[in-house]
Amino acid sequence: MTHQAILPEGWPRPKGYANGVVARGRMLFIAGTIGWDAQERIVSDDFGAQARQALDNVAQVLRAAGGKPENIVRMTWYVTDKREYLAAAREIGQAFRELIGCYDIAMTAVEVKALIEDRAKVEIEATAVLPD
């Protein structure tokens, strides 16, 4: 294992993320990925479908570097509509479990006015620590 989740004493265990992560190894910084395919076509206007594709894109970059989803230590999600994000929580959770698996990741979600690609509803950037 390349990282360990940190839970301060007395704090409740967070649902779907870690409060902090300690890691050792080679750093991989994954640029923001959106819900488009390898030909840069947005896969759907559905928030959940875009989130699934963005997560898959993160996983593909990770695999290309020789990593695995469990090497991810940090994610930042940029969403254009927090209500749409919350409404798709079940679908996002299922995609996350299937594609990433581990919730011991320091995560942040931020609502933004817009993303650079007009149809994009979510952009995910990640940091992974790969074993030496």
Image (cartoon, rainbow, N blue to C red):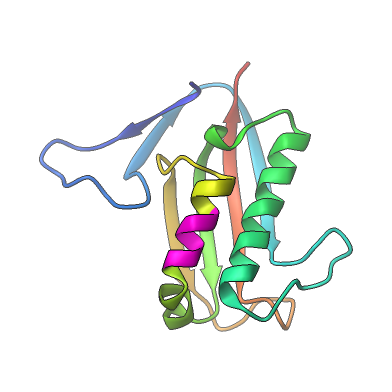
Q: Is residue 70 left or right of residue 49?
A: left
Give the residue at x 73% y 43%. Answer: 61
* Magenta extent: 90-95
Task: Find residue 29 and report its horizontal and vertical position in percent.
Answer: 65, 42
Looking at the image, which residue sits at the far left?
10
Task: Find residue 97 and report its horizontal and vertical position in percent.
Answer: 49, 48
Number of numbered discs:
0
Quadrant for residue 83, please give it: bottom left
Give the residue at x 59% y 47%. Answer: 99
Give the residue at x 15% y 45%. Answer: 11
Q: Is residue 131 left or right of residue 105?
A: right
Does 63 appear above or below 131? below
Q: Nearer the viewer, residue 83 or 124?
A: 83
Looking at the image, which residue sits at the far top?
132
Q: State yes or no: residue 60 in magenta.
A: no
Does 2 appear above or below 19? above
Give the residue at x 68% y 61%. Answer: 53
- The quadrant of the rendering that contains the C terminus is top right
Task: Find residue 38 and report its horizontal and vertical position in percent.
Answer: 85, 58
Q: Nearer the viewer, residue 131 or 96?
A: 96
Looking at the image, which residue sits at the far right?
39
Quadrant for residue 89, please give it: bottom left
Q: Nearer the viewer, residue 9 or 96?
A: 96
Q: Is residue 70 left or right of residue 7?
A: right
Does 92 appear above or below 58? below
Q: Nearer the viewer, residue 113 or 99?
A: 99
- SS assignment for the magenta stretch, majority: helix
